[in-house]
Image (spheres, rainbow, N blue to C red):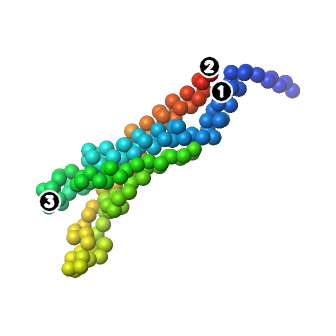
Amino acid sequence: MFTLELKDDDLDRALARLGAGLEDMSEVTNEIGGFLAESHQQRIERSLGAPDGTAWALNSPFTRTRDPRPLIDTGEMARNINHQYGPDYAEVIATGRQVRTMHYGAAKGAFGQTAKGRPLPWGNIPARPFMGLSETDRSNIAEALQEWVEGLLSQGN
């Protein structure tokens, strides 16, 4: 039997840095969370449609008199998209009372009635999915991770 052992101090240090970096990826997960939150905000502000590129349903004729762009009214929904991150995760968070309805839609009367007996919502609201990863998002995540790993490996060289 023949055994060959290679010893390379630079490689050992680079692997040690990589191992330590994988213990706490907060730097890159913060970066990823930040650009994903921005991507979701822009998807709404620019009426880009669903993450897979599917166009959103048009607003009703009544709503179009106020603003023809789906998911735009006061801008509150886009402003309420943020991110959180930790050593091993990044997440995009959308808060606000209208988020679930806009993403999944709602049938006329799904939320009950007004004090005067009118349905809430007063008409069907089509789903306009906005949460999820686009191909551009996926590519940006891969690029950020690659740059982060390369940075870990090149430190001290």
At horizontal 38% and vertical 57% (from top left) the residue drawn is 95
Label 3: which secondary element: helix
Q: Position of residue 151 (x, y in %)?
A: 55, 27
At horizontal 29% and vertical 49% (from top left) the residue drawn is 44
Of marks 1 and 3, the one in the foreground: 1
Task: Give the amino acid type for the residue marked by disc 3 in the picture.
Answer: Pro
Residues at circles 2 and 1 in contact by the CB criterion of under 8 Å: yes
At horizontal 24% and vertical 67% (from top left) the residue drawn is 124
At horizontal 52% and vertical 35% (from top left) the residue drawn is 145
Which residue is identified by label 3? 61
Q: Position of residue 74 (x, y in %)?
A: 24, 54
Task: Give the amino acid type for the residue marked by disc 2 in the picture.
Answer: Asn
Please identify the quarter of the rendering in which residue 108 is found.
Answer: bottom left
Which residue is identified by label 1? 14
Q: Residue furthest right?
A: 1
Q: Is residue 10 above or below residue 52?
A: above
Label 2: which secondary element: loop
Please identify the quarter of the rendering in which residue 8 is found.
Answer: top right
Q: Residue furthest left?
A: 65
Q: Position of residue 107 (x, y in %)?
A: 28, 69
Dot 2 alpha-carbon crowd within 10 angstroms: few under 14, some 14 to 19, many 20 or more: few
Residues at circles 1 and 3 in contact by the CB criterion of under 8 Å: no
Residues at circles 2 and 3 in contact by the CB criterion of under 8 Å: no
Task: Give the amino acid type for the residue marked by disc 1 in the picture.
Answer: Ala
Left or right: 52, with 84 as reference point: left
Residue nearest the viewer, comparing 105 with 85: 85
Q: Is residue 5 visible?
A: yes
Q: Position of residue 7 (x, y in %)?
A: 76, 22
Sooner in the amino-acid sequence: mark 2 or mark 3: 3
Residue nearest the viewer, comparing 22 with 139: 22
Residue nearest the viewer, comparing 96 with 47: 96
Which residue is identified by label 2? 157
